[in-house]
Image (cartoon, helix red, strand yellow):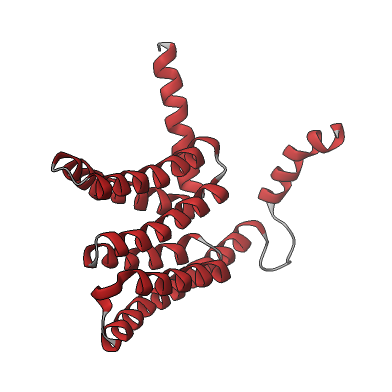
Amino acid sequence: MPLGRRWVKRIRDRIRDRLRGDLRLTIATLCVGFAMMWILPFSIYRFAVGNFAIGLLDLLIVAGIALPASHALLTGRSESGIRIVAIVCCLGCVAAAQVIGLVGLLWTYAAVAFVFFVLPRNLALAMSSGTLLAVMVAAGEELASTFERVSYLASAALVGLIAHVVATRYERQRQQLETLAWIDPLTGAGNRRILELELSQAPAAAAG
């Protein structure tokens, strides 16, 4: 196999293994890919029709989520990359709500759900709450009446609540399955997998 194809295959296998072992990175990658698929064509269209300000905003959002997500996939350092993606998504929603109006406002539902699936619970709660409040301020005339503001806040909060419940339930079940995979339920002792892990780490610990 040529060296170039071997290198591409190695990178592809590494990315596939990381996606299999990290659900948050998988969700972030899927959301980034979906957002790029929708936002990038609009950015190109707006540049073509001379709407450079909004086109540049779309392009900055795409770059702001694509670069950290790509870095996380290639290096395996998913924690910081995912947080940057979440921050850019929330800031992008605020900017879009102010510049575009209703169309930008609708993206906050996706952003609120996204942060609950990829961030720790308290951080997700703080970031989603701050985003909703900032969007309501930035939206201006799109949410002119009190009724519109309350309706928007209630519907977005419901999306966040559902995402929080699903993400929390999944994390709890994942921890239970991980415990069953490593700990014998009858004796409470580690099973063969823990033994193999400790044996594999023993040389490095002895050398250190």
Q: Residue 8 in the image: x percent, y percent?
A: 41, 23
Q: Where on the picture, by quarter, is residue 149?
A: bottom left
In the current view of this chain or complex, which residue is farthest to the top? 2
In the current view of this chain or complex, which residue is farthest to the left? 49
Q: Identify the residue at horizontal 24%, vertical 60% (top origin).
A: 100
Q: Identify the residue at horizontal 44%, vertical 40% (top origin).
A: 67
Foreground of the two, 115 or 3: 115
- Where the N terminus falls, by quadrant? top left
Q: Identify the residue at horizontal 72%, vertical 57% (top origin).
A: 190
**On screen, 14 above or below 188?**
above
Q: Where on the picture, by quarter, is residue 27?
A: bottom left
Foreground of the two, 139 or 73: 139
190 with respect to 111 (left or right) = right
Q: Where on the picture, by quarter, is residue 9?
A: top left
- Where the C terminus falls, by quadrant? top right
Q: Identify the residue at horizontal 46%, vertical 57% (top origin).
A: 86
In the current view of this chain or complex, which residue is farthest to the bottom? 147
**On screen, 174 above or below 162?**
above
Foreground of the two, 72 or 66: 66
183 with respect to 25 (left or right) = right
Foreground of the two, 195 or 124: 124
Q: Residue 4 in the image: x percent, y percent?
A: 41, 15
99 with respect to 6 (left or right) = left
**On screen, 115 above or below 198?**
below
Q: Residue 156 in the image: x percent, y percent?
A: 35, 76
How many numbered marks does the figure carry? 0
**On screen, 12 above or below 39?**
above
Q: Residue 207 in the image: x percent, y percent?
A: 85, 31
